[in-house]
Image (cartoon, rainbow, N blue to C red):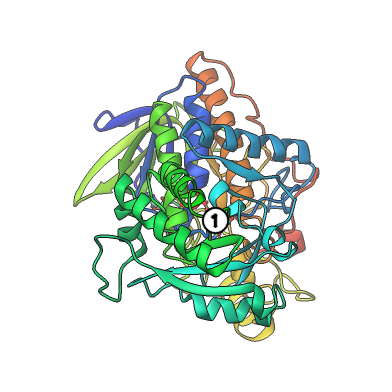
Amino acid sequence: MSAPGGRLSTGRSADVAVIGGGLAGLCAAIAAAKHGLRVVVVRRGLGTTAMSSGGLDFPADLPRLYGAGVGGPGVSSAATSEAAGTLGDWLRAAGAELRGRPGEEMLLLDTAGDVRRTNLALVQHAAGSVERWSGQGGKLLLLGVAGYPSFRPEWVRRRVVAAGLLPAERVAAGRVTVPGLKDEGDLPAARLARALEVPDTAKAFASAVGRAAREAGASHVALPPVLGLEKASEVFRWVTEAVAAHAPVAVFELLSPPPSVPGQRLQDLLDRVAVAAGVEIASGRVTGAALEAAPEPAEGPENLASVTVESQGRNWTLSAREFILATGKYAAGGLDAGGLAVAEPVFGLAVFVPPPPGWPSAELPAGQRLVREMVYDRFAARHPVFEAGLAVDWGLRPLGGDGRTPRFANLRAAGSVLGGYNHFADGAGSGVAVVTGLEAGRLAAEAASASEKGEAPAGAGAATPETGAGAATPETGAVGREPA
Ligand SMILES: Cc1cc2nc3c(=O)[nH]c(=O)nc-3n(C[C@H](O)[C@H](O)[C@H](O)COP(=O)(O)OP(=O)(O)OC[C@H]3O[C@@H](n4cnc5c(N)ncnc54)[C@H](O)[C@@H]3O)c2cc1C
């Protein structure tokens, strides 16, 4: 962190500054902007939201995150449902339809032939839930696109049959071409998706799909997720309407492993909702922070004054009343596992990891304990490295190395930078990002408004670890690293 100093006068300012612009950061930013505040999101690029499959893993109850409140008694199923409803309303306003409910299982096939358990999805994916095509007496046609190698319909057909989802006579495979696109053998999904945003191209493609469905006698047609990016809702409508003119079939899109058009769509939809709500999105990497100058040594956590943003070789500062850290996990850069221990690179916050079962907490230094456990002890089970992350208090403020007190009074955290859950094993990635993002945005907005009026911000007290603290406290063997 850069040297403490007074409030910086150069650069930009906001009421709420959000670091990271994935699902969690954007939910936080939109929620804060809807309180009428000036919100700036700084992001260095796209994170894992843009790589996600198109299925939003959203349990009815959040897993228990590290710290007090969240995922414990603090988040009820009603609050989780409300958060999913808010997301659905926002996406609808941007022209997309979200289907499903938190906790209700939705089984969707992906382009690799794996069946994914998830909970929410846009309508073009939800229309293909496994029970829709496996239970009835119809026939599934898996249709690839000529020149697009990332979806091999024959291979997925074999997997569907091998998994017992359908008998061989009820699943067929074929290919269609996208008019105007030369079969170069390695067309990227995004290029196909953009080509299909031209209405005439989409309609000609849909006619070919409709003819193939009629010839195969199919009741359901599965396509790779290439039906548009920004105009995905329109393209899906054009295609389903044009196919219906040829054959009475249900068309749907498969989910996708990364790189993922469905993930890019979700990211793009949220970007549009954020911009419509008045959020400013700036490109850049936050590299450090300055503290607010205290008139006299004060008790309790310090206040952040500004963050330093590096963008295209230039540095600028962003000052704000409240800050939200939503920098994701390893793939996005929110956590760094490059050395022996896991680090949080922007603020040097304490990172907590699950204690190895039966190990005395003080036996090994943090880094060695983590590495030894990763490599030798639980490699094949729930991998502790995915549960590493920040612990927070009831106000979502990251705790210091003591595992009890917030490190900064005006910093909250949301999304996958938080620790205590494994988004692969717990099926909770999107749910945690949305619920904690909305909550961090609301709390930050309330605190920023209160500080403008000179009132004490709500929830300014210390953490209450006695009332439901998560698994990663020092007493239970957490590994806390004092901030650098
Ligand atoms: C490969 C992969 C696939 C996944 N698929 C799914 C799925 O299909 N369904 C599901 O529910 N969950 C999935 N997840 C879990 C996923 O991480 C969450 O669902 C959710 O999208 C995470 O959102 P987030 O906002 O916390 O992080 P991210 O979307 O990763 O966003 C982090 C943001 O922080 C920015 N950032 C990082 N460091 C800085 C910095 N120093 N300065 C400025 N900006 C910074 C990044 O550029 C990015 O904008 C997947 C995870 C991975 C790794």
State the image quarter where residue 188 is shown: bottom left
According to the image, label 1 marks what residue?
Answer: 252
Above or below, 354 against 313 in this view is below
Q: Residue at x 63, y 44 (%)?
A: 99
Please say if 198 is above or below 209: above
- On the image, the x and y values in percent for residue 338 come to 44, 72
Question: Which residue lies at the image location 76% right of the left edge and 36% below the top edge?
Answer: 78
Please tell me in which quadrant of the rendered image residue 115 appears.
bottom right
Q: Where is residue 414 in the image (x, y as percent from the top left)?
A: 56, 45
Camera-side residue of 378 and 287: 378
Which residue is more in the foreground, 108 or 321? 108
Q: Which amino acid does label 1 sit on?
A: Phe
Q: From the viewer's perspective, is 335 left or right of 376?
A: left
The part of the image, by quadrant, that contains residue 292 is: top left
Q: Residue furthest left?
A: 313
Residue 325 percent location from the top left of the image: 48, 45
Residue 341 falls left or right of residue 226: right
- Give the tally of numbered discs: 1
Looking at the image, the residue that sits furthest to the top is 453
Q: Looking at the image, can residue 283 be seen?
A: yes
Q: Does residue 305 appear anywhere in the picture?
A: no
Relative vertical location of residue 378 with respect to residue 189 in this rendering, above or below: below
Q: Considering depth in this image, is 67 or 57 the residue closer to the camera?
A: 57
Residue 136 versus residue 420: which sits nearer the camera? 136
Q: Label 1: few (<14), some or many (≥20) within 10 Å?
A: many
Direction bottom: furthest residue: 376
Instruction: Give the structural element (helix, strand or loop) at label 1.
Output: strand
Quick check: 389 above or below 383? Answer: above
The residue lying at 59 percent from left, 24 percent from top is 457
Does the Cβ of the disc 1 residue fall within 8 Å of ligand 1? no
User: Does residue 425 appear to the left or right of 443 in the view shown?
Assistant: right
Position of residue 365 measured from the top left corner of the image (x, y, whole percent):
60, 73
